[in-house]
Image (tube, rainbow, N blue to C red):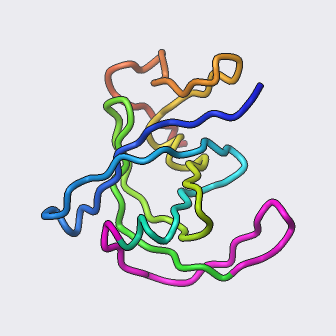
Amino acid sequence: MGLISIDIQLSNPAAPHLKPMTATALVDTGATTLCVPEFVAIQLQLQESEKRVVNTADGKSHVVPYMGPLKIQYEGRTCYTGAIVIGDTMLMGAIPLEDMDLNLLPAERKVVVNPNSPNIPSAIAK
């Protein structure tokens, strides 16, 4: 299959004077949240709200900053979230993918808007 990466736009809604940045994120459905490198947190002037324990693929636990707020935009969809600051690669986890109602097409190595709700993101609340 291979890896799937997408270009997303990130901005800090608490600092509207800052220009948004475009970044490439590796789509990782094994991750739950958005993970960003430290330089992204610095550039967007994100504020740390707390520390979190993160378990990485190598089996190690790390105490890392959880920062935000962050606005993510992709294919006309928007999500507001926080981010774990770790590593040097941006990872887009399952929660922001679900929040923007995006679908993975692994065979095509693409992320697309849910075809069942092309105009307005849908969610399940039951």
Q: In the rendered view, tell whether residue 64 sits above or below residue 99.
A: below
Q: Residue pushed farthest left?
A: 17
Q: Residue at x 85, y 64 (%)?
A: 58
Q: Residue at x 57, y 57 (%)?
A: 33
Q: Is-magenta flag for residue 7?
A: no
> Which residues, given as a range, are shown in magenta?
43-62
- Rendered location of residue 40, percent (x, y): 42, 64
Q: Residue at x 32, y 21 (%)?
A: 119
Q: Residue pushed farthest right?
A: 59
Q: How many marks?
A: 0
Q: Is residue 97 left or right of residue 52?
A: left
Q: Quadrant of residue 11?
A: bottom left
Q: Residue at x 52, y 65 (%)?
A: 37
Q: Is residue 31 left or right of residue 73?
A: right
For the N terminus, the image quarter is: top right
Q: Is residue 53 left or right of residue 19?
A: right
Q: In the rendered view, tell whether residue 99 sits above or below residue 46.
A: above
- Rendered location of residue 23, percent (x, y): 42, 48
- Rendered location of residue 13, percent (x, y): 24, 61
- Rendered location of residue 86, percent (x, y): 60, 69
| Residue closer to the observer: 67 or 39 | 39
Q: In the rendered view, tell whether residue 105 sits above or below residue 35.
A: above
Q: Quadrant of residue 12?
A: bottom left
For the C terminus, the image quarter is: top right
